[in-house]
Amino acid sequence: MKRIGMLTSGGDCQALNAAMRGVVKTLDHSKEKVEIYGFLDGYKGLIYSKFQMLTGRDFSGILTKGGTILGTSRTPFKTIQDPDENGLNKVDAMKQNYYKLQLDCLVILGGNGTHKTANLLRQQGLNIVTLPKTIDNDLWGTDMTFGFQSAVNIATDAIDCIHTTASSHGRVFIVEVMGHKVGWLTLNAGMAGGADIILLPEIPYDIDKVVDKIEERDKRGSRFTIIAVAEGAISKEDAALSKKEYKKKLEKRALSSVSYELAAEIQKKTGREVRVTVPGHMQRGGSPCPYDRVFASRLGAEAGRLILDNQYGFMVGYKNREIVKVPLEDVAGKLKMVEPDSTIVQEAKLLGISFGD
Amino acid sequence: MKRIGMLTSGGDCQALNAAMRGVVKTLDHSKEKVEIYGFLDGYKGLIYSKFQMLTGRDFSGILTKGGTILGTSRTPFKTIQDPDENGLNKVDAMKQNYYKLQLDCLVILGGNGTHKTANLLRQQGLNIVTLPKTIDNDLWGTDMTFGFQSAVNIATDAIDCIHTTASSHGRVFIVEVMGHKVGWLTLNAGMAGGADIILLPEIPYDIDKVVDKIEERDKRGSRFTIIAVAEGAISKEDAALSKKEYKKKLEKRALSSVSYELAAEIQKKTGREVRVTVPGHMQRGGSPCPYDRVFASRLGAEAGRLILDNQYGFMVGYKNREIVKVPLEDVAGKLKMVEPDSTIVQEAKLLGISFGD
Amino acid sequence: MKRIGMLTSGGDCQALNAAMRGVVKTLDHSKEKVEIYGFLDGYKGLIYSKFQMLTGRDFSGILTKGGTILGTSRTPFKTIQDPDENGLNKVDAMKQNYYKLQLDCLVILGGNGTHKTANLLRQQGLNIVTLPKTIDNDLWGTDMTFGFQSAVNIATDAIDCIHTTASSHGRVFIVEVMGHKVGWLTLNAGMAGGADIILLPEIPYDIDKVVDKIEERDKRGSRFTIIAVAEGAISKEDAALSKKEYKKKLEKRALSSVSYELAAEIQKKTGREVRVTVPGHMQRGGSPCPYDRVFASRLGAEAGRLILDNQYGFMVGYKNREIVKVPLEDVAGKLKMVEPDSTIVQEAKLLGISFGD
Amino acid sequence: MKRIGMLTSGGDCQALNAAMRGVVKTLDHSKEKVEIYGFLDGYKGLIYSKFQMLTGRDFSGILTKGGTILGTSRTPFKTIQDPDENGLNKVDAMKQNYYKLQLDCLVILGGNGTHKTANLLRQQGLNIVTLPKTIDNDLWGTDMTFGFQSAVNIATDAIDCIHTTASSHGRVFIVEVMGHKVGWLTLNAGMAGGADIILLPEIPYDIDKVVDKIEERDKRGSRFTIIAVAEGAISKEDAALSKKEYKKKLEKRALSSVSYELAAEIQKKTGREVRVTVPGHMQRGGSPCPYDRVFASRLGAEAGRLILDNQYGFMVGYKNREIVKVPLEDVAGKLKMVEPDSTIVQEAKLLGISFGD
């Protein structure tokens, strides 16, 4: 008999439900008797002992359902060790609830921040298995995260839609893709959507190079230009600022984003009409794509297998087309970024895509 | 033998190509010999005599293609009668080019502004047939316009995506739908996407009623609320302003939009996290949906039939499930708006949707 | 206080759930107290008194869900008046259960067969309100049925997919679309998908005309031909057979369908490779399209309004863009077919589409 | 200056155009002057010297377009060495045309059969670079082929649609997925669509095990069962037949397929209604999914790079997330099959999926 706690933390994404279904189906089809405690709204549920008892039936029919049936919330790692407003030590509270419920392990689905906290709980002696969830595909130790391919599809759809209107009007169009620190999503959606320019956090851009590309296209007779811009895209000038100065600048932007600033600059330098589209939170919503459903189900199944084998302290990841277990301490606190000279960036450049560098 | 000019004007939308294909296929399959002059980028092409000779082959395979193969531009009716920067009288220029090319008629695809200019050209003695293109479905004299249903699909998709993330996080989400003056698109996408609150230009909202609905949902145990907001949604207070005052206010908003203002108010009044999504120009892009393809093809075919019959001065419209011809003077300058007490609004209210009124 | 029975009968389709949600939301938001008895698997549930008590909560979140949460089955009108294998008179059983549960009315969602039985129950004195469900759009008394537009989308998708492969290989492709007696679905999907030939039950085809069209396309340089064929498409020869002879012929076809027969004939007469695709039951599945969601919700809301007004004996239909109530006796037993000389068929012919007639 | 011949051979699939665009964009953006000879309809174009001179412009805007702008045909390897009906030796003809046009190399896009012929041409001394195209993902030497993920999406869509109708009616549904020899497509679509049973060519099934699974589901209260069946799925009995006997059996099946046979057996053994859906050629059609667009573009770019480096005799493949070059002799004539005891099959079993073994 096993008592298993489960929670989803951080921004939601596609295939969270598929992954949990994978874990629970695997446990359900084993000989082991299992009790599942679903903590609500991320770590909060564990801190304040808000949970539901779940059975296999609760996880049936959710393979194609977006979001997470457990709810989620952002509980920043920075503050997880601070006492809450009533003076409750949150880490202690999580440990106490874990032991009070006599849990055998916690299954935690989340991204970077979530993994830092998960590793902290492991250090505190809890049995942890994690699953790599994020549309950013920026988790260290795994080639792929679930949610990513579904988000690529939505962002690409946005670029596809913009393509027809851009070509009809002969305009410059900026499509802002999610990703504050890491550009995988923008890079892939940009390549899939046939963007002419792709601007990533990892490759600071020179506004003049961006303008050059637009004008080169014009000379070739292409009336329009599509620019895929990551939320965290940064100009060479801004990249040269101190962290503090840059943070200040970001605060000034307020509601607006890098895209509007970029649009204004291009408009000024080229005299062309520039339009901005921000699909925003759409990118983490909707039904997971088949790739993510298969991938999350496989990861979930392997997480179930680890639990049945009493192997804890791992993230279930994906390396060289094999499912692997990665020690949590290797994952926490590291980001997998787009290398400016990686093969895929080189290939994008061979295709004529400019990175503004 | 017939010489036919064709142009698409105003914001582009889905099924413009399908409609033109319908006209050309009909002419092509008739016994009449036909020459087609495709004017580029809307009325500009007619003013400056920029055109391409097109054949049936150019219109083959474009049924499913978004945008317009002729290009388009906004040439506001307000300024169409003014001379251009070189002193050229634009209306005279259009007439001259029409007669110089010995055109038998002009086929013009566009929305409201386009129809005002089309009617002006008709008054000047040109033979005109128009087709009702707009994602806003706000053209007078027709129950439906092409582009509308495709835009509903995209806006609904956006709401669907937001639904999963809203329910996972327990947040209030605002989805801003296109439509500055008319709310058909927001109303239909809102109903299709299961929005809880729908705010339209035609029905000024009371912020307190909006807040009430959010809190009523909370009491019922619904953790989230989805609000579909038209670009031109307006509060009761703003609706009471003079036109001049309101215009001033709009100018202040600048890059931002009604949604961000609304979000800030709700956040202040309810203490809840509110997020905004603006699918924007995506709504006019992409491949037309089957409904629009059939509809635009039918309208195009009937426009072809009118031309073969030498019947001019009409928009081809749709009334009570029949294709009809509507005199241009009846169409120009009028908007088809959502009546606040119309059956569809009543039905939406029966379903529990609040309009904030 | 009202006690309402509800059932879905016949082949399932998209937006059944959306329609039921519309009814229940309307009742729920009224002041009336309501009890809902959901009968399982169509009329069977009423006959054998298998039902679940449902509340508003059961209908929440199902707007976008395909199928029917009540289950359905085909209970042919022909046999509904026969006793079952235990000698139970099925009509009597339905009446008894209706009265035993003290129902105020029955809400019945279904197509043609379903409406015949619904009308029979009305004649027996039961209070009935029906909603027009069918992908065939063949119900008398309403311009539109829900499910239809969603099915058009799927069938069109199939033709779109086939288009690319047909043009790559230069083949003749037959896409078989659902519809044994009525061709609305095939006609619309065919027009939307750009089919070159459309064969409908209502317009018997001449195989030589079909072959002519293929060869005419060949001469024009079009390497491929797409034929949209309704399941019930019929050749002129077969249409001349007696009903009995034709039925015999259909029985011989067994697993195969008209498409394979047609493919063989074309292959023989033209020497071309012909391929057949049968999307089949896919056409009634999946999430309803936005059009159907709005439409079914509106119908549901109006059904709710009728119930609150104690108005029974009607199907809620749609005429000239208004929701209307149609006496059940006017609906039952009649089919709304494609008229061979209707405007839409004429328009399709103007576009160059052959009906093989 | 380089003269490059290009052809697509075998069944078409998604992203053929994207891959060719990748090659041509890469060459176009290099300093090398390039002439491109597009051979029409596969090897036939090379044999009979039917080609078009193409430029970068011809490959613009085709990233999202399904099919192949060059056309394709099946030219079986078995017969490629035989003289044609006029006594022309086809291999000699290809060589002669290659030399007559003074080509520097041939870029060949295709699957298994295509690669055998490509390798033969390499052995004859021609410079060859190939790209792995197939929805079957069965090419040796590469982890992935383009077309595969797009086909998974379409087949999964079919299962998704069937899911709603299966659950409404409580039926057993068979969805037949493409794949005569290899089951990757069925395995992935089956897992993504939540199929309960998956039958593959590589894992012969026992009909009794299939029936057991259906009845076990029934006992658990699941009213329906979805079976994903590869075209080449085979029972244990048939797998025990000699090749000759099995071939005979296949011939008898004629128009029908394994699915109809299986349906009949299940119906007989369980008394349940079984329905079959065959999406067929739809699976190779339509616009490529974003994954395939990125993947094919990257492969195309690397093929361009090989050509610029004068490296010939390779297929551009994908191994452990890196683009690699694989000697043609290693690829030709080998199939990459699903191993019955591979990790992914084990994981599917953990999820409760039966393979009937």
Image: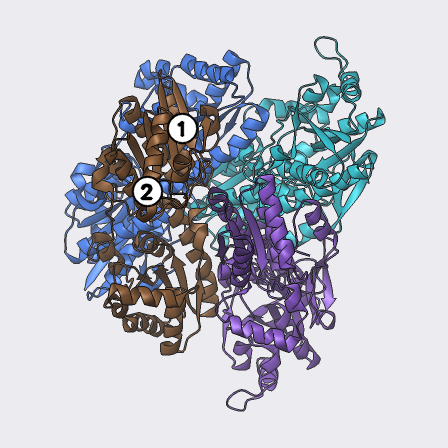
Chain colours: A blue, B cyan, C purple, D brown
Label 2: element kind: helix
Q: Position of residue A82 (x, y in %)?
A: 26, 37
Relative vertical location of residue B349 with respect to residue A28 in this rendering, above or below:
above
Q: Residues within 10 Å of mark 1 (few under 14, many from 20)?
A: many
Disc 2 is attached to a residue of which chain? Answer: D
Residue A168 relative to residue D115: left or right: right
Residue at position x 55%, y 89% from top? C88
* Spatial separation of the CA atoms under disc 1 and disc 2: 44 Å
Task: Look at the picture and state if A111 lies above or below C136.
Answer: above
B5 or B241: nearer the viewer: B5
**What residue is pinned by disc 2?**
D114
Image position, residue A186 (x, y; %): 38, 31
What amino acid does circle 1 point to? Glu
- Front residue of A181/D152: it is D152
Q: Is residue B229 left or right of residue D108?
A: right
Q: Nearer the viewer, mark 1 or mark 2?
A: 2
User: Residue A329, how many percent across, how many down?
Assistant: 16, 39
Please, which residue is most extreme toward the bottom here?
C87
Q: Residue at x 33, y 44 (%)?
A: D80
Which image quadrant for residue C185? bottom right
Q: Which of D303 and B47 lies nearest the eye of the viewer?
A: D303
The residue that label 1 is drawn on is A231
Q: Secondary structure at mark 1?
A: loop
Up-down relation of residue A260 to residue D348 (above or below)? above
